[in-house]
Image (cartoon, coloured by chain):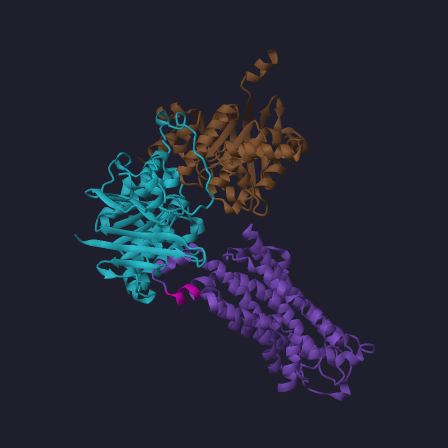
Amino acid sequence: MKYLLKTENLKKYYGKKEVVKALDDVSLAIEEGKSLGLIGESGSGKSTLGRIISCLEKPTFGKISFMDQRIDNLSEKQFRSLRKDMQIIFQSSKGVFDPTYTIGDSIKEVLKNFEKLSEREYEERIDETLKSVGLDPDLKYRNVNQLSGGQCQRANIARALILRPKFVICDEPVSSLDYSIRKQILNLLNEIKEKYGITYLLITHDLSNVSYVCQAVAIMYKGKIVEYLDDTEKIGEKVIHPYSKILYASIPKANPHNRSIVYDKDNERVSELNQIIKGCSFWDRCEKCSEICKKNIPDLKEIYPGHKVACHLV
Amino acid sequence: MVKKVIDIENVFFYNRKSKVEKLENKVISNFGLKRFLEKTSTKAGFLIIIIFITVALFAPVLAPHDPLLVDVTNKLKNPSLSYPFGTDQLGRCVLSRLIWGARNSLLYSFTVLFATLMIGVPIGLVSGYLGGKVDSVIMRIIDIFMAMPSFIVALAIAGTLGASGKNLVFSMSLVYWAEYARLSRALTMQIKEQSYVMALKAGGCNDFQILFKHVLRNIASSIIALATMEIGSIILSIAGFSFIGLGVQAPTPEWGILLSDSKEYIQTFPSLMIYPGVAIVIVVMAFNLVGGGIQDGLSAKKR
Amino acid sequence: MDSQQKKDRPKKIVVKNLSIDFDCEQGKIHAVKNVSFEILKGSITALVGESGSGKSVTSMSLMGLLDSNGKVTGGNVFWEKNDLLKMKPKKRMALNGNLFGMIFQDPMTSLDPLFSIETQMVEGIRYHSRCSKKEAYEKAVKNLFDMGFDEPEKLMKKRPFELSGGMCQRVMIAMMIALEPQFLIADEPTTALDVTVQKQILKKIYRICHEKNVGVLFITHDLGVVGEIADKVYIMQKGEIVDKGNAFDIFDRPNHSYTKKLIASIIN
């Protein structure tokens, strides 16, 4: 099997005295054409993983290989040639474009870094890319502040797309957008995926986004991957790890006929304040927690083909 | 003696640090700059500056006489057609000396400004961008220069290298660059945290591109604001240093020199002193009006 | 008995034809146009709209917290025959504390990082109801416990930045509830939170509303949240209310094209 991207035992620690483990032993593999959704809440390390894979940060320990080439030990200069194939779309906010540049110039700069073309070819390429993300090419003369949130995110996608990358990391691409635009952007990501043959790493906190765009899913909790599924059809019913279940049950149901809050018991307690936990990182929130969970860290085991879970109780 | 020096320092160079601090929190796009001209006072200031700069540029054409031509028989004349502002104690045309004085004063001030910007801004950019040890070393150096009173430095340099316009420019640039370095460092550190810097890195831009094509552009308006506020005080200090004999030397026509030359005639012929004094006041005020206008524009944008 | 019955009758805040303008450089902006709705005690009223639709401005005007360049140009807000908008500012501020509690989107910034939770809660309670420090403290402990904190005494020694976003939001709600307001205005209270925490907070709000008979105005852009807890829904677009009804009707039989668009954009 050919892997586009592979990480092995990736670790990232912050701080010197009080070590914060942002990533703890993360091993992932992404096949070409099989987009992976990485789900986690804030503080789970999912964004750190995205930045490390795109070489914007260095891991403390571990190996990353991209297109059969090890990249974690490359310097910024050596990695630059690979950026053409690996792009990243940041969480949509106006901050992702230099406010003193027009959209066109921002996109052109990226293109200029990698390809030497004539002025006209540059313009044509930019127009074409803007059209493919559903933007009017005339918008390239505008500044970020003159774009709406949705347009801004489309332009952001256009910038990542202009180099025709093989692999795109999307870090929360829709979470800061208005509700009605989210679906449009996800649809756009899907269209582009098929048109240009791109593989995504979709980093999000929203399970519903994942099944929309991705073919595989990994769920992260406190720097570890707790569940990996090779299939995103009806993930909610297939997940086994207690955390994944809670996560799935927490998605608000837009259909009021399915509302669950009315019937749910309200018994959550919040007690720990920055408690350091031994054993499974989830035991304090787990309903089925047993003695072994408090002592040993569970491994990520394959229970069915293409389905891995890190839990003692499975 | 020491007390007097400190007093002069206070009068000439009011609170430099606080000005930098005021601007440090203001990273604003150029948008604010475009609007600054809306205010009438700013427009007036801008107009005055343009007039003075034009006068300075065309001094050889505009001046009716040679500013250095001594004609003792013609001394201390009242205004007449050929000498619109009269003549001084050596019979030189006061108007011509004022016009050439504008040229010299502005030239020296802009040279100081240019030099400080050229030294200060790149150092601040690199220091803020790299951070870490490089930053702390550079910051300590900046602190040392910020602590140096420009008066003492000018005195020391005039004492060792001799008092001249060139040496004054040198000594002032030596002190003033630190402000720009500090300001641009603080602004760079803010810009560095913006997500577009990371987006640029991901887009394959190297550090040089990011710093000088993006960061510099984004902090430019704040630096321009400081520079316009500063230039008034630079003009003042150059005139001040020349007045007390530490800067430009007589008989070069320069406003400070004009003032110091005429100080003996303050009772008998006060107009000699009034003309350069008024010129300095007007120019400094004009620059402060524009600087204030820019700053208002910036804070309006922030709101 | 008679007075008891009077209390049981649902009380409500009625907003009638509210219009708000903002003075900007580009001229006047009509942020809110002729908006009418009511907030019933003991039920959750949701105000749904995208950013810039005027939903937050509406809620701010209820509390009298509009920015200095914003102005109410017409309409009334009735509470027991009093028009809040026509009241004297001083009287209105006094009424506000007992009438409204507000929860903001970003709990981290609405709590003062310089003071401990204890100081902020006790001060807040004592400001609104005359009671001793000890009573206020006990009240704070009780409310924090109700919000799910196991050790409220320990928690109260902490400062806001030592807590996570979800915990801050709980503290914020506990603080508001301790003041025993009749209405709770929640402006995107869960947007900045994780999904699992969001659900817990929603549960709390739902429970408070029904157990303590508090009227909730829930402002959000997320239709999912609306589907979970709202009783009555108003949909705002560009400063106008384009659709209204109870949550089931809105979902089953949307009238307005914008509502239909919103429902079509649900991802599942």
Residue range corresponding to the magenta coloring: B206-211
Residue B231 location (% of width, % of height): 61, 69
Q: Colour of chain C?
A: brown
Furthest toward the right, the residue is: B267
Which quarter of the rendering shows the N terminus of chain B?
bottom right
Dominant secondary structure of the residues highlighted in magenta in the image:
helix
Residue placed farthest to the left in the image? A1
Residue A137 seen anywhere in this rendered image of the structure: no
Residue closer to the observer: A244 or A119: A244
- The quarter of the picture where residue B238 lies is bottom right
The question of residue B267 being in magenta is answered with: no
Left/right of residue C189 with respect to residue C65 in the rendered view:
left
Quarter occupied by residue B232? bottom right
In the rendered image, residue C128, in percent from the top left (x then y), is placed at 64, 32
Nearest the eye: B80 or A220: A220
Q: Colour of chain A?
A: cyan
The quadrant holding residue A119 is: bottom left
Name which residue lies at 18% across and 54% down: A2
Q: Which chain comes out purple in the rendered image?
A: B
Left or right, A281 with reference to C232 = left
Along the horizontal axis of the image, is B259 left or right of A108? right
| Residue at position x 67%, y 72% in the image | B236
Q: Position of residue B13 (x, y in %)?
A: 67, 69
